Amino acid sequence: MPDNGLSKERLTWMYTQMARIREFEERVKRTFEEHPGVIRGHTHLADGAEASIVGSLAALGPDDQLTATYRCHGYPLALGTDPKALMAEIYGKETGICKGYGGSMHLTDVGRGFLGTSGIVGQGIPHAAGVAWAAQIRGKNQVVLSFFGDGATKQGAFHETLNIASLWKLPVVFVMENNNYQAYTPVEQEDANAAAGEPLAVKAKAHSMPGVTVDGGDPVAVHQTMHAAVERARSGDGPTLVESRVYRLSAHGNIIAPPGVPLHYPEHEAVAIFGNVEEYEAAKRGDPVPRFRARLVTDGVLSAEDADAIAEAARKEMQEAVDFGLSSSFPAPEKAVDYVYA
């Protein structure tokens, strides 16, 4: 039976994208262990946020657009970006989606509405409002999503942008993916509202817009919340702040250590860094990918065999992406300044 008005095909699409994102992130993580030195610098993984990403993007129309944080691999994957080009970009190869110039934190696929990311916390928030303003001026019936983490709500750009977006009724939805930790610091140590027990979506009150908190581990609940926010924006009623509560299952910058140097963390660095094994184990039990799989099988949307086939297809697809990335060439040194403009 369809779940909350979503068709079997749509629910299957949602699970498929969640499985693909998880497998992609696992392959990125394994590259550090199996191919030391292939990925330079940090990668920021979204394992644990798959339901939030997919539930949100399922509410978009074909002409809608979005900006995101540096924890950004899942968005273009769900939008249709070739995982081979995406993996090659993370490896810094010339076959990458940005020709190797961007890397893990600076991905862009404008043709699919993915307008780009940055390592700067909160940078996409004003950019999204600018794109929404342009759409409003042109009279296009477009909506722009702005994804950012809970830490970005401390930036002046967050408050300045929400203020003007509310005043001008811009067609933008602000999506705060609250993953409980600002790098390694628990959110309740950083925010008085969180410590007082209020959701961070309460910040919307200061800017005269709706603020909604949703379980980011439930893609159907996220879709319902985002659908309402997107339709509000599209109808000209202005922005919404959606707080999607997720749990980051990997550490802030993935697993990084020079070859031959042991990591400073035991079995899983997220456990050690977060310092709360019980909390982490509870989050693993609520892992959104197997949780949604079980729900679809129980509800008769998918058979166990169909769900297994989707997972196996994702594993094969992402192994092909790894193989493609590893076999690709680095950009020639003389091309280093090809895209530098004065």
Image: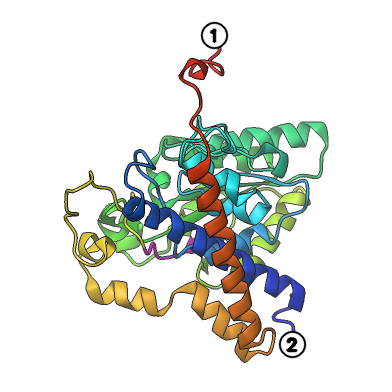
| Relative height, residue 289 to residue 59 (above, below) | below
Identify the magenta region: 244-249
Q: Is residue 240 visible?
A: no
Quarter of the image containing the C terminus? top right
| Relative height, residue 261 to residue 160 (above, below) | below
At which x and y percent is residue 306?
A: 66, 81
Left or right: residue 228 compared with residue 321: right
Q: What residue lies at 33% left-to-right and 41% top-to-bottom?
A: 37
At which x and y percent is residue 16?
A: 63, 69
At which x and y percent is residue 282?
A: 34, 78
| Relative height, residue 282 to residue 216 (above, below) | below
Tell me which amino acid carries mark 2: Met
Q: Is residue 83 visible?
A: yes
Left or right: residue 129 compared with residue 135: left
State the residue position of label 1. Answer: 342
Whether 217 is among the magenta residues is: no
**Closer to the camera in the image, 119 or 176:** 119
Tag of residue 1: 2
Q: Earlier in the sequence, mark 1 or mark 2?
A: 2
Tell me which amino acid carries mark 1: Ala
**Closer to the camera in the image, 131 or 313:** 313
Tag of residue 123: none
Q: What residue lies at 37% left-to-right and 75% top-to-bottom?
A: 284
Q: Residue furthest top?
A: 342
Circle 1 crowding by C-alpha within 10 Å: few under 14, some 14–19, many from 20 = few
Q: Main secondary structure of the magenta part?
A: loop
